[in-house]
Each structure stands twice: as structure tokens, then as C-alpha cells.
Image (spheres, rainbow, N blue to C red):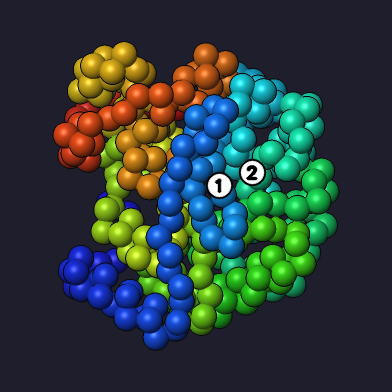
Amino acid sequence: PLSAPRVHSRLGAMAVLAKMSAVLGLALASRAVVVASGAGVPDADIGFGVSMPMLAFGTMTMSNKGCTVEGAVEQWIRLGGRHIDMSLLYKTQPDAGRGIKASGVPRKELFLTTKVEGPIGYNATIDQVINQDLPQVGVDYFDLLIIHFPCPTMADFPNKCGSKFKQERLDTWRGLEYLKSTGKVRAIGISNFNTEQTMELIGAGYRPMVNQVQWHLGYHNDTFLEEMSALGIIVEAWASLAGPTKSHNIPGVSLGDARLMTLAAKYNASTAQVALQWSVNKGVAPVTATCVADHAVSDLKAFDFKLTEQDMTYLDSLKEEDPSMEMIV
């Protein structure tokens, strides 16, 4: 499904990545996922002493229909959520910032992500974060800054430009590195980069800490996940419940799918809880969103039960059964 290329075979891909890592002298420690206190959402060590909650709240307007982004963010934090995923592109950062402030939760207890809008270059990257992102959200630093997509135009979304614009990507990455060195961001990463585009950064001596890609039941590439894991990169999932992808003609297993509902009933859980835990159990951090308080509470309790290995394998195998079925965000 995902457009991550396979390097001849799974074993071949792992060998190539391991060899490249050894040549560059990169310390690719495995990322330990531990159960956090409070809401029970697991944390992931993404490197350099930074822990990232493995469940994020997205701030796109289309993902929060029926409420304001400000209200949705405030509600998520008050209910125990700690990771907020933002972007200048969404045009909701000021709203998210007000929700963060209204929650009353100290800044140091939150994990805030924002994005640079493509390979915009060194100077533009620094300018965007310093003069737009930080003031809009009303904070002094971000916990994670990622390059939103590897190509300069949305016509090539998510990564159709391939090896073109490599220099622009490297130049933009250097801007991220500068912002990290000044303390304006704690961790840096990428989004929608395939393996080849990721390896451009690795080949230049850099290592992203996170790669956020489209990932959900019925649409996931385990080879890509293994390739990222071999590089010490945590994968995040946008469209983690398959909802926002329907208009893109991308397959996905709806939360209303009868097979998923049957499995969820076995655990007295919601289908969203099953989908979120499946993702995290695979080492992938989902981004979700909701206006409904009960749904937010349910999402945050998605780790109060344990899917069996057999059921994880079954979920891995699910394909979209009815393309006409409404997908629920």
C-alpha cells in the first residue's frame, strides 16, 4: 500500500539499511515503548532523552467537525491527552494554542508537534517556526518539528517527486537541525517520506526521529515499518482510523466494519480502541481527533486491555470489505 519501495526483498532491505547505518556510524538503538502513568497512553523513547506519547490529537478542521479546534484541544488535554499534532497548513494553530492555554496544564507536561510545509529551505524553515508557528501557538518551543511532505507541490503528494528536490530537502533539514540546536525544538523528523527519501538524510549523516505517514487497518506496509525501525525511526500514523482517506480513494477498514465490531465485542471495547491499540502494538503512534468527550475518553483508554497475538495477526490481514461503506473518523 504505502509508496515505500522495497529493496529487492525484506531481508535485502534490512541488510542494505544495516550496512548503511554501520558505514555512517549511526547508533540505532531500539526504541522502547513503556506504559505511561495517568491516561495509560504508552510513551516511546524517540532519542536524545525525548519521550513521545504514542497517541496524538490532530488539529485539522475536517477532523473536528461539530466543534472548534480550540474546544476540542482543551477537552483532549483536560481528559488526559498530552500529545497535540499541529501544522501551519491547517490554519488552526492559534485555535490550538488557545485550547492549550485554557486547559491549564503546564507546558512541560505536554508534547507539541508542528510541521514545516515541505522542502522550503534553510532560511524559510527558521523563519516559519520563529515568526509564525511559535507565536501562533503561544509557546517558547516545540517538542517535535517535522517536514510535512518531501515534495514542494501538493500535486506530488505524498512523495511522488521521488529523488527530485533532494537538495531542497537536505537544506530544509539543516534548518530543523539549527532550530534543535537553539532549543526551539526538542526533536526533529519527517512526514510522508518513503524509504529512498529517508535514506537521503541518512546518507548525509542525519537521522530523523519520527516519520509520520498514512497508516491504518487495511492500508499498512510492514516492510516499510521494519525499514524505519532498522533506522531507529518511530512511525506515526495520520488517518489512523481510516476516516479522512475515503476521498483519496485509499482502502481502509471502517470502524463500522462487521468483522472489526465482532472482534471489539470480544474485549468489550470500541472498534476505535481496537484500531488504536493494534497500531501502537505494532510500534506506530496514531494521530486521532474527536469533538465528543466520550470518544476522547474511550481513545485514551484504548490500552486498558490487551489484544492477543492471534487477534493482532487477524487485524493485520483485514482488507477493505465494502468500499462504499462510510468511514468514521
Mark drawn on residue 19: none
Residue drawn 74% across and 31% down? 105
Q: Position of residue 212 (x, y in %)?
A: 47, 52
Query: Who's the residue at 20% across and 36% down the image?
Result: 309
Pointers 1 and 2 in contact (C-beta within 8 Å): yes
Residue 238 visible:
no
Q: Nearer the viewer, residue 236 or 90?
A: 236
- Classify 10 Å Cα crowding around label 1: few (below 14), some (14-19), many (20 and above): many
Query: In this orientation, which residue lies closer to the viewer: 168 or 263?
Result: 263
Residue drawn at (44%, 83%), measured in percent from left and top? 24
Camera-side residue: 111 or 43? 43
Q: Quadrant of the C terminus?
A: top left
Q: Which mark is residue 111?
A: 2
Q: Give x and y (percent) for residue 311.
A: 20, 31
Q: Quadrant of residue 3?
A: bottom left
| Quarter-of-image position of residue 161 | bottom left
Picture coordinates of residue 301, whole percent (x, y): 46, 23
Secondary structure state at the residue bearing disc 2: strand
Instruction: Give the structural element (helix, strand or loop) at label 1.
Output: strand
N-terminal-most mark, 1 or 2: 1
Residue placed at 55% from the left, 80% from the top?
A: 167
**Residue wearing tag 1:** 52
Residue 314 at what x, y percent from top left? Answer: 17, 34
Decide: is 88 above or below 243.
Answer: below
Instruction: Please tell me whether residue 329 is drawn above or below residue 217 in the rendered image.
Output: above
Look at label 1 and name its amino acid. Met
Q: Quadrant of residue 107?
A: top right
Q: Is residue 129 visible?
A: yes
Which one is nearer the viewer's eye here, 114 or 264? 264
Q: How many numbered discs, if any?
A: 2
Q: Amino acid at mark 2?
A: Phe
Q: Is residue 283 left or right of residue 10?
A: right
